[in-house]
Amino acid sequence: MTIYNKVMRMINSSGVTSKEWFEKAVVLTEIHGLNIAVGDHNEYFSELEVHTTRIHELVANMIKREVYLKEELATKNEDIASIATTLENNNNEIAQLHKQIDEMRTTNVNNYSLNGVLSRLVAEQEIQLKDLKEVISTKEKVIVSFAESLENSKIENAELHKQVDAMKVTNENNQSLIGEYKEKINSLSGLVVEREVQL
């Protein structure tokens, strides 16, 4: 794999724009350069670099998780819509069966000689009606379960947003620390130059 392909893969998986990714890479490079230039701060810069890299990784993982949850929510919404359509069809079928049962009962009254046959047909229809009611009950439970899962996913998504915001605040604090370290290093470098001039 070429360096270009490797960099593009890292950018795509980071969840940020190319510009943002390169800005972060430049910051890390500057930190590394300062780390080499000023040996006294080697340990601090190394630790800061590790934390900054970890923050970027956590933010990227949070974004990936959020995308996954959104896709999962969309799938669940489609499933719920499909179940709702099926329930509506079942309700229509039940209404049709009720209508057929009423018609059969009316026919049974008017045609006493066919009472045995009609009673058997009515019994069969009532069994089918009972089975359909059981199916509807099961599907209603599935809808309730999907609704609960959907709510849990929303809560988890909100929590992820909070974590991402917290990470952003931490990253901003680290950037501020980097700025302070740069100022201190520049000040120390100036003192070193002055001392060398005096010597």
Image (cartoon, grey):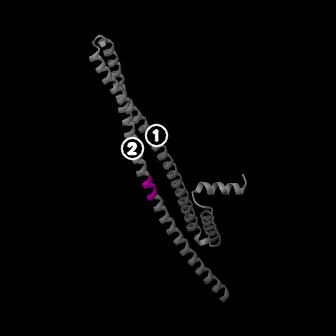
| As drawn, 61 above or below 126 | below
Q: Please tell me whether residue 154 is drawn above or below residue 26 in the rendered image.
A: above
Q: Nearer the viewer, residue 90 or 45?
A: 90
Disc number at residue 79? 1
Which residue occupies the extreme right position in the image?
2
Q: Residue furthest front?
A: 110
Mark 2 vs mark 1: give the one in front: 1
Quadrant of the image containing the C terminus: bottom right
Q: Where is residue 43 in the image (x, y as percent from the top left)?
A: 57, 66
Please give the residue where the numbered disc 2 appears in the rendered image: 147
User: Of marks 2 and 1, which one's residue comes earlier in the chain?
Assistant: 1
User: What type of secondary structure mainly makes up the magenta span?
Assistant: helix
Q: Position of residue 9 (x, y in %)?
A: 65, 54
Q: Tell me residue 18's x, y (percent).
A: 63, 62
Quadrant hosting residue 198: bottom right
Please tell me which residue is depicted at 37% across the width and 28% down the height of the picture: 96
The residue lying furthest to the bottom in this view is 198
Within-10-Å neighbours for mark 1: few <14, some 14–19, many 20+: some
Q: Where is residue 139 in the image (x, y as percent from the top left)?
A: 39, 34
Q: Nearer the viewer, residue 183 or 133?
A: 133
| Residue 113 visible in the picture | yes
Span of residues in magenta: 157-162
